[in-house]
Image (spheres, coloured by chain):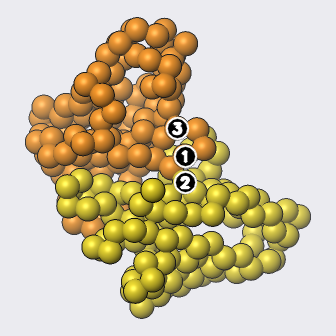
Chain colours: A orange, B yellow
Amino acid sequence: GAGVSQSPRYKVAKRGQDVALRCDPISGHVSLFWYQQALGQGPEFLTYFQNEAQLDKSGLPSDRFFAERPEGSVSTLKIQRTQQEDSAVYLCASTQDSLNQPQHFGDGTRLSIL
Amino acid sequence: RKEVEQDPGPFNVPEGATVAFNCTYSNSASQSFFWYRQDCRKEPKLLMSVYSSGNEDGRFTAQLNRASQYISLLIRDSKLSDSATYLCVVNADSNSGYALNFGKGTSLLVTP
């Protein structure tokens, strides 16, 4: 595809359920980033991949959050035992390489935890 | 303290007005600076990069003052379609690869 694709667009889950969010970066983009955007806030960094290597996960809020990118392309962000405070928009972005390039964002997944 | 600070607004201006947004950042080692635009319930989209010498793109002018760690965006001849949230963005420190630090955004409403 031409841009970053994320699915699902919307996800509603009950507290305690596990969820998985998918990101298809722009083809050939080496770097992939996940961000979390709460209502009324700017996006906050979660984690960063260069190809299949997760080079930084310092932004993940707890050990319930896990991300992977096993083949260096598609990435999945998994949240286990979801809590209400996990409700947010989860944005994925990619760049051709990481060096000072503007990032291109997907539409995001809007997660609501009931 | 957030690394990127912006006045959240809202800024309500009439069509045709000139409006300026300011932003400060705390990490003096930052190398890349951007303005992103975000429409309601949409993803952030790159508006423009910000260069040390200042740069212009049509009605939009961005300025960077490294000494003061200050970034600005000027919009001339505002259009209704300029209504959005404007996010000041600075690259994070090396511990976060080249992840971006976003301000909370400044809300702009252009009225007829």
Rendered position, B62 above or below B2 = below
**Residue A22, percent from left and from top:** 33, 29
For mark 1, give the secondary structure.
Answer: loop
Query: At x 14% / y 46%, what residue is drawn?
Result: A55
Q: Which residue is mark 2?
A: B104
What residue is rendered at 46% in x and 31% in y? A109
**Residue A46, percent from left and from top:** 32, 41
Residue A32, percent across and down? 26, 46
> Could you say which quadrant of the image residue B58 lies in?
bottom right
Q: Chain of mark 3?
A: A
State the image quarter where residue A35 is shown.
top left
Label 2: element kind: loop
Q: CA distance from mark 3 to mark 1?
A: 5 Å
Residue highlighted by disc 1: A41
Q: Amino acid at mark 1?
A: Gln
**Which residue position holds label 3?**
A38
Contact, mark 3 vs mark 1 (Cβ under 8 Å): yes
Whether label 1 touches label 2, CB < 8 Å? yes
Do the residues under discs 3 and 2 have CB atoms within 8 angstroms? no
Spatial CA distance of label 1 from label 2 is: 5 Å
